[in-house]
Image: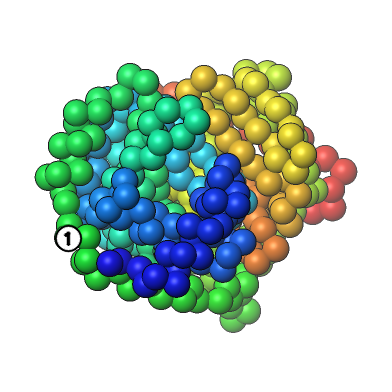
């Protein structure tokens, strides 16, 4: 038995009382993690499988067309397509398909399940991955055109014993934005000399800044605070002008990227939604605490982004203009993003 009877009984009672509540919300309501809820289904539709990305992710290609979901506390990113172009790595791996585009950090892929559920809409099949604290890292949902035979083959080939260790750890308390006051001048000096956006994380980690701490410290012309509604405004204006974007949403274990325009925007209560056929985004706009206009120098010109953070200083989403290897022109996006700062003190 993966979970003790008292926890199983608590989960069963909560599901009976709230049969349509989403796992994340139900888990929070009863003081458990989402992984607990899935683990409660082991032997009743859920099966333990290996979470190692080097093994699991290449197998996902056999599922055909699916929906990939990556989220954090305040934003959900859903892409439809196929898992292709996997590149393994011990510290970082990637999926570089034309539809599904991921950055994977394997040490956070700790527990995984193949889940089959009977719902009012029919049978739902998914692969769900969680970190050591039981937080969802990445999920794959089969759709009408997905290969169910391949799903069953994955569940069998990657199976772990139902009673394999299932230890969950308490998450670390958020530290808040990290600023190293002694290194602000060095940060500005290094920032101006970047030639690739990937140098940013190496530089800030070395100087002991986190992302938001660096933005707050570096100042103009590299980072400028925007109004809290600027991320929604950026998406709204980009949709109206059919501007191609790159939208990044992630958590410590996975970042998922949409490349292309957005079209159908639907605010629903606190949620601001993109509801396009192959891409959905669900943003808790009311939980955006800070938004920043950011410029990072590259060999092909500045990479301009609009980035939203929550009250704990954690990244909610990042929006860039889309440019391919063959094209460097993001002038329309750059002008749109810069325009959000008009009238805002630098």
Quarter of the figure with the N terminus: bottom left
- Compare residues 147 and 299 and report the one nearer the observer: 147
Q: Quadrant of residue 343?
A: top right
Q: Considering only vertical position in the picture, is 36 above or below 302?
A: below
Furthest residue to the right? Answer: 343
User: x%, y% of residue 26?
Assistant: 57, 55
Q: Considering only vertical position in the picture, is 332 above or below 108?
A: above
For the image shown, how many numbered marks are present on the structure? 1
Furthest residue to the bottom? Answer: 182
Query: Which residue position holds label 1?
Result: 161
The residue depicted at 23 percent of the width and 35 percent of the height is 151
User: x%, y% of residue 13?
Assistant: 53, 58
337 sits left or right of 26 in the view: right
Q: How is the image coloured?
A: rainbow
| Whether residue 76 is visible | yes
Secondary-structure class at tag 1: loop
Q: Residues within 10 Å of mark 1 (few under 14, many from 20)?
A: few
User: x%, y% of residue 197?
Assistant: 46, 49
| Whether residue 88 is visible | no
The residue depicted at 35 percent of the width and 68 percent of the height is 3
């Amino acid at each position: 038995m993966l979970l003790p009877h008292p926890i199983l009984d608590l989960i069963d009672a909560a599901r009976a009382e709230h049969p349509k509540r989403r796992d994340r919300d139900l888990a929070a309501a009863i003081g458990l993690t989402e992984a607990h809820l899935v683990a409660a289904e082991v032997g009743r539709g859920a099966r333990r499988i290996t979470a190692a990305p080097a093994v699991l992710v290449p197998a996902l290609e056999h599922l055909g067309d699916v929906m990939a979901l990556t989220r954090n506390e305040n934003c959900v990113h859903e892409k439809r397509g196929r898992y292709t172009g996997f590149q393994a790595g011990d510290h970082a791996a990637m999926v570089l398909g034309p539809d599904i585009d991921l950055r994977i950090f394997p040490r956070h892929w700790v527990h995984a399940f193949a889940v089959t559920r009977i719902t009012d809409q029919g049978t739902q099949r998914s692969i769900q991955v969680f970190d050591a604290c039981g937080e969802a890292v990445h999920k794959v949902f089969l759709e009408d055109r997905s290969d169910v035979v391949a799903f069953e083959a994955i569940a069998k080939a990657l199976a772990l014993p139902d009673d394999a260790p299932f230890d969950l750890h308490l998450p670390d308390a958020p530290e808040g934005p990290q600023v190293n006051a002694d290194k602000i001048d060095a940060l500005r000096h290094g920032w101006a000399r970047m030639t690739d956006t990937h140098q940013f994380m190496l530089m800030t980690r070395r100087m002991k800044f986190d992302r938001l701490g660096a933005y707050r410290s570096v100042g103009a012309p590299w980072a400028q605070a925007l109004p809290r509604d600027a991320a929604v405004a950026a998406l709204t204006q980009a949709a109206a002008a059919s501007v191609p974007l790159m939208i990044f949403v992630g958590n410590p274990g996975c970042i998922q990227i949409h490349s292309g325009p957005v079209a159908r925007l639907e605010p629903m209560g606190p949620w601001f939604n993109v509801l396009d056929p192959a891409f959905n985004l669900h943003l808790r706009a009311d939980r955006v605490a800070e938004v920043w206009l950011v410029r990072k120098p590259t060999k092909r010109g500045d990479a301009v982004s609009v980035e939203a953070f929550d009250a704990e200083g954690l990244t909610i989403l990042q929006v860039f203009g889309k440019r391919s290897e063959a094209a460097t022109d993001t002038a329309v996006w750059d002008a749109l993003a810069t325009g959000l700062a008009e009238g805002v003190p630098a």
